[in-house]
Image (tube, coloured by chain):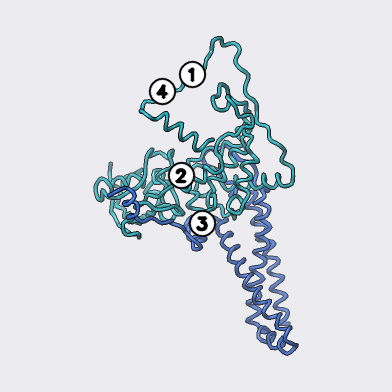
Amino acid sequence: MGFAKREKKYKSKYNMTGTLGWIGNLRMNMERYLYFLHRVTGIGLVLYLILHILVTSSRMYGEGAYEISHSIINNPIADIGLFFVMAGLIFHGVNGIRLILNEYGFLLGKPTKPVYPYRQVLKTRGPRYFILLMIIIGAILLLIVGYELLLVWVF
Amino acid sequence: METVKKVTFRIKRWIPEEGKFRIDAFEIPVFRGMTVLEGLIYIKENLDSSLAFRRSCRMATCGICGIIINGKPMLACATQILHLNSDTITLEPLKNLPLVKDLVVDHTPFFEKQRLIKPYIIRQDEGEEYWNPTREYKQTPEEVEEYLQFSYCLTCALCYAACPTSGTNKNYLGPQALMNAYRFIADSRDEGVFIRLDIVDSPDGCWGCHLAGSCSDACPKGVDPALAIQLLRKKVIERDLGYLKTVKGTSLVSPLPHIEGAKRVEPPKFTIRGAKKKAQEILEKYFK
């Protein structure tokens, strides 16, 4: 059998991790979790935006249509959903600020001598404290959002 | 060697004749200090001679034995079985590369991408001195530290297998190639910064990175590709804002005047017939 024929006989394929590989890799460092959440919240926000445009665009068909579409979403369950949308928005926002700063080379420092134990710059104090700061800012914003939503139904 | 315990290797093998995976289990005796690679060699010698895997140096220097061990990309030769703290160890071929057989993958796309970013010193004054060097270029220890960390890369493709962007985009250059681009940009002898920035400034280049940090986490040599890619992006921004001026590489060291009659040491003669011609062909193909 010629070499070309033998090549054809044996099958090969790219062993791609694909979209499941966002979390499929078991070596999950903190930035990988943030990366996954950033992607998921991004997709969630786009879906919410479509829903939001659909609801508000009903105003084009008169005041009655707008009232009907609004009455569907005007309940506590929808507000709980809105809370999660806001949580996603806050996470995406604060993590986005971290990514913008880090991805343009800020807060990362300089390369070091490769001496064991090896230093990973993302695991040093600067980037990690910045993540902590973003968590605190996010938590404060989320408390404000939760309080505002509670005001509507409780008080 | 005294056997400490028995461990089961569950190997996810690619069967090229059938075009699908098959999982085989092998029970092997483990002694203290035994690496995963030694376990694979034990299987090949005693249990199944048809098992295919790659290895060469057995001391984390060649970087060819990279496989997925218990879901994590690691070097088989640098991972001790007892350190894994598990009675069953799952082995898979590296991700994001074409499969060949069992645990063997084809590294061609990986090396093609490395070749794209021109991983060698580029000089504007390319002449006789560039092709047949007689002296070194000047470099201070501080200038060496700018890129030394990135020059320790083994090209083992563990970062490439761990990267989520490489897992969804076949055209993405990958952490290793981008890191290597920065390694040469940061080198004070190099003058090819604008050539390389043009290559990496694309969604398939440095803008494809989403800072998941898995590449740095997987690297067995502490090379930190994630840092290099972010610094590379900084360079692209600097160029776009006009801060990056024409880079002049360091000059050659002065000739040594006190050695009279000093001449260049010739490289050893090729021992294999036709090797010189082959080497020249490769040089002409990739470096001209």
In this rendering, the answer to whether B10 lies above or below A59 is above
Q: Which mark is residue B156?
A: 2
Marks 3 and 1, how far apart at CA = 51 Å
- Secondary-structure class at tag 4: loop
Q: Which mark is residue A28?
A: 3
Marks 1 and 4, how far apart at CA = 12 Å
Tint of chain A:
blue
In this rendering, the answer to whether B56 lies above or below A139 is above
The chain that hosts pointer 4 is: B
- Secondary-structure class at tag 3: loop
Residue corresponding to mark 1: B265
Asked if badge 2 and badge 3 are on a common chain, one would say no
User: Percent from the top left, x then y, of residue B217?
Assistant: 52, 49
**Which amino acid type is marked by label 3?**
Met
The mark tally for this picture is: 4
Marks 4 and 3, how far apart at CA = 50 Å
User: Percent from the top left, x then y, of residue A153?
Assistant: 70, 82
Q: Is residue B258 visible?
A: yes
Looking at the rendered image, the disc whose residue lies closer to the viewer, 3 or 1, is 1
Q: Is residue B68 visible?
A: no
**Marked residue nearer the N-terminal end (1 or 2):** 2
Q: Is B84 on the left or on the right of A35, as rendered?
A: left
Tint of chain B:
cyan
The chain that hosts pointer 2 is: B
Marks 2 and 4, how far apart at CA = 30 Å
Q: Nearer the viewer, residue B245 or A47?
A: B245
- Secondary-structure class at tag 2: loop
